[in-house]
Amino acid sequence: MYKITVTLFAFLLSVVSLFAGSCEGDIKSESVNFFSQEIDVKYNINMVVDFKPCIKVKCIEKYKEELEKTDYQTLLDNLEAHRKSLNLNDWLFYELMYATVADIFDSKDENTQTLTVSFLMAKSGYDVRMSTVGLKHLFLFIKSNDMVFGIPIIRPGSKTFINVTTFKSKVSMGGAWMNDTELLWNEGGKGMDIKLNELPTFTGNNINQRISFKYNGQDYHIETKVNHSIKEMMSDYPRLKEISYIEAPLSEYSKKILLPQLRAHLSRFNQKESLEFLAAFTRSFEYKWDHTFSDINLPMIADEVLISEFSDHEDRVALYYQLVKELLDLPMLVLSFMDDTKSTIAVATDEPLGKPIDYAGQAYYICDPTGPNNSAEIGKFPTAFSTSDVEVLGTYKE
C-alpha cells in the first residue's frame, strides 16, 4: 500500500512539474495606447521566447512550437475581456492585438511580431495565412467577411483574405503575386467582421463641442461631447463601401448627450418641421469637398462629422440618416446620383414634400442635407438631377 501511494504521489508530482515547466513565468502588465485610450493588458513574460529572426517555413513552425509551450492564454483571455468591455468588432480586436504585441515584443523584429500576431489570431479562432517575399518580409492574411478597398487581397477557394501586414506596417509587396501562401493556421476558422455595426465604448479623450445654427430665424445652440478616439480610429480604418459609413450608428456619447437635446426641440415641431430642423443642424458644419485636400474620397461616419473641421455630401448624409433614424424613425432611401459625385437621402413622409420617388410602392421625398449652410429647405432635387438619375444604395424600414 505504501509503495502504491508513493508511486502515485511521484507520478502526480511529475505531471505538476511538467505543467509548471511549460507555463512558468511571471504575470506582468503593459499599458497599451489604443487610439489614445490607455489599456492595461496582462500577459506572462514567458511568451517572449528567444527566437533568431527567420521566416523560412521550418523556422516559423519552430517558433509556433515554442509559443505553444508558453502561457499565451493569459494574454488572450485579457484581450478578450477588453474586447467585451470596449465593444470591439473583429477588426478592432485585431487592432488591439497588433498594438499589444508591438508593445510587449518591442525588442523583436517586425516579422517576429507579425508571427506572434498570426499565432494569437489563429488561437482566437480566425483563419489566417502567411506568405513571404524573397524570404525578407512576412505577410499576414486574415479571412474577412466584408468588402474592403485599398488593401491587397487573395481569394483562394472563393474565400477572401486581406493582407493586414501591408495595411498596418505599410510594407509593400513589391508587385509580388501573393496567392501562394505557404502557411495556413487554423484553416476553416472564422473570418473578421469589419463593418461597423456598433461603435466602441471609449471612455476617455472626450471634447466639449458647441454647435450653433439657425432655423426659422431663431438661433439654436447645442452643447455636446465628442470622442476624439473615434476620429483616430476611423483615420486608421480600412476603407469600406460608402453605405457602410452611412449605416454606422452614432456613438453612445451622442445618443446620451446629443439626441436628448435635439429630441426636446423636435417635440414642438410637426414631421416636416422636424426634418427641416435636422437638415439645418446638419448643414451647420463647414462644407469642403474631399478632393480639395485629398486624392481619394474619405467618407465619414456620423460621429466624425460632429468633430471634424470639414465635411462633404456623403458625410452629412451619414449624420442626417442617423438623426432621422434615431429621432423620427421614418423609412429612408440612401441615393447615389448616376455621375457618382453625390449622394443624398429620400424620406417617406406622411405629407408630400415635392416630387416623389416611388420605391416598392411607397413615395419618398428628397431631404438633401448637403447645404447650403444656414438653410432648412427640403423636398427638392439638387440642381440638374431628377428621379431617373439616382440609384438606391441602401434602405431603412423599406
Image: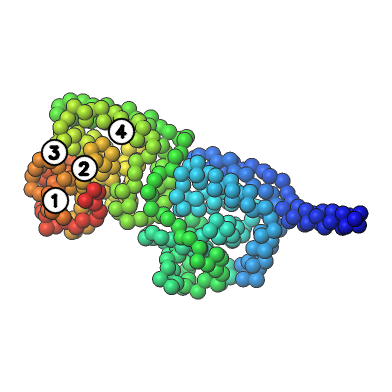
- Per the model, the C-alpha gap separating discs 3 and 2 is 18 Å
Residue under pointer 2:
330
Residue under pointer 1:
362
Lower sequence index among marks 4 and 3 = 4
* Element under disc 4: helix
Q: Position of residue 355 (x, y in %)?
A: 8, 48
Residue under pointer 3:
377
At label 1, the amino acid type is Gln
Does residue 385 appear in the picture of this structure? no
Lower sequence index among marks 1 and 2 = 2
- Per the model, the C-alpha gap separating discs 3 and 1 is 22 Å
* Label of residue 259 in the image: 4
Lower sequence index among marks 3 and 1 = 1
- Per the model, the C-alpha gap separating discs 4 and 3 is 22 Å
* Element under disc 1: strand
Report whether 230 appears left or right of 120: left
| Quadrant where the image shows the N terminus | bottom right
Q: Nearer the viewer, mark 4 or mark 3?
A: 4
- 237 vs 324, nearest the viewer: 324
Q: Position of residue 376 (x, y in %)?
A: 16, 36
Q: Position of residue 75 (x, y in %)?
A: 61, 49
- 241 vs 177, nearest the viewer: 241
**Residue contact at pointers 3 and 2, CB within 8 angstroms:** no
At label 3, the amino acid type is Glu
**Residue contact at pointers 1 and 2, CB within 8 angstroms:** no
- Per the model, the C-alpha gap separating discs 1 and 4 is 28 Å
**Residue contact at pointers 4 and 3, CB within 8 angstroms:** no
Few, some or many C-alpha atoms within 10 Å of disc 3 (few <14, some 14-19, many ≥20)? Answer: some
Q: Position of residue 369 (x, y in %)?
A: 20, 42
